Amino acid sequence: MAKRRFKKIGIDIDGVVCDVMSSLLKKCNEEYNLNLSVKDITEWNYKNHKFELEDEIRKHFADYDFLISLPLINDAEKAIKFLKKHYKVVFITSRWRFTKRVTKKWIKKHFGKTKIIFEREKEHINVDLLIDDKFGQVNAFTRETGKPSILFSQPWNEMMEIKEPICRCRNWVEVLLYIIVKEDDLKDRKVREWGNVMHIANLIRKK
């Protein structure tokens, strides 16, 4: 049996697994009479004449009902359950520790019992691959460890230029494809790659 390249995979929560921004902007639009969409948030420290995004995040993250009801990113649940069958998966989040109880409950509801690490400097966590939507996190992780990472595409990281061993993935099908290609060393076998795309897409999206 071939040795696995990735034994332990670290996955960020907000913006990768949990679609916090859509729910947050809905609150902001209602409160400040705005019409913002996720695509308008082109930087994480977004602010306008009515609010600063970081302040709104902290305010609403203190609301248990807000956090427990947050929706999933498309395909995240099925994709991560697929990964858990083959790898050790750990969630690594920069959330404040006062969210610990509700975060654990939300993760357990969608993914079963899974380890969660609350850490802002993720390069210090021992994983073989990091998946995150914040460029600073994947860049620091890869720079400090020499290990690959995945930048999960969001409007606030679209302008960032990346290079190997950081890879940009726009959805969870691309994430799974990346992992399979790396594991099987299929970089030059395009037919097999596209076969894997269709297989994984059908696998995680089937009803």
Image: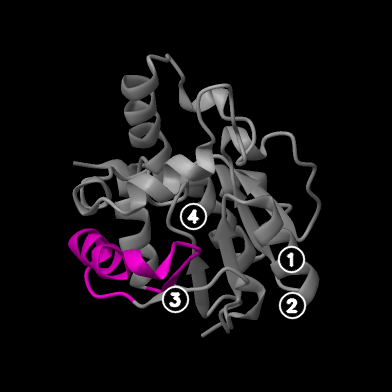
* Chain-order first, disc 1 or disc 3: 3
Which residue is at 52% across, 37% downward? 53
* Chain-order first, disc 1 or disc 2: 1
Q: Which residue is mark 1?
A: 140
Q: Is residue 180 left or right of residue 37?
A: right
Point out the frontmost of discs 4 and 1: 1
Which labelled disc corresponds to residue 145?
2
* Chain-order first, disc 4 or disc 2: 2
Image x and y of residue 57, in percent? 43, 45
Assess whether mark 2 and mark 1 are in contact (beta carbons under 8 angstroms): no
Secondary structure beneath dot 4 equals helix
Q: Is residue 101 magenta?
A: yes
Point out the frontmost of discs 1 and 2: 1
Which labelled disc corresponds to residue 176?
4
How many C-alpha atoms fall within 10 Å of the one at disc 1: few (<14), some, or many (≥20)? Answer: some
Secondary structure beneath dot 1 equals helix
User: Looking at the rendering, in which quadrant would you find the C terminus?
Assistant: top left
User: Type of residue at label 2?
Assistant: Thr
Mark-to-mark CA distance, 4 and 1: 22 Å
Assess whether mark 2 and mark 4 are in contact (beta carbons under 8 angstroms): no
Point out the frontmost of discs 2 and 3: 3
Start-end of magenta stretch: 86-114
Q: Is residue 164 left or right of residue 21?
A: right
Secondary structure beneath dot 3 equals strand
How many C-alpha atoms fall within 10 Å of the one at disc 2: few (<14), some, or many (≥20)? Answer: some
Q: Is residue 189 above or below residue 7?
A: above
Which labelled disc corresponds to residue 117?
3
Image x and y of residue 94, in percent? 50, 63
Assess whether mark 3 and mark 2 are in contact (beta carbons under 8 angstroms): no
How many C-alpha atoms fall within 10 Å of the one at disc 3: few (<14), some, or many (≥20)? Answer: some
Secondary structure beneath dot 2 equals helix
Viewer-nearest residue: 197 or 37: 37
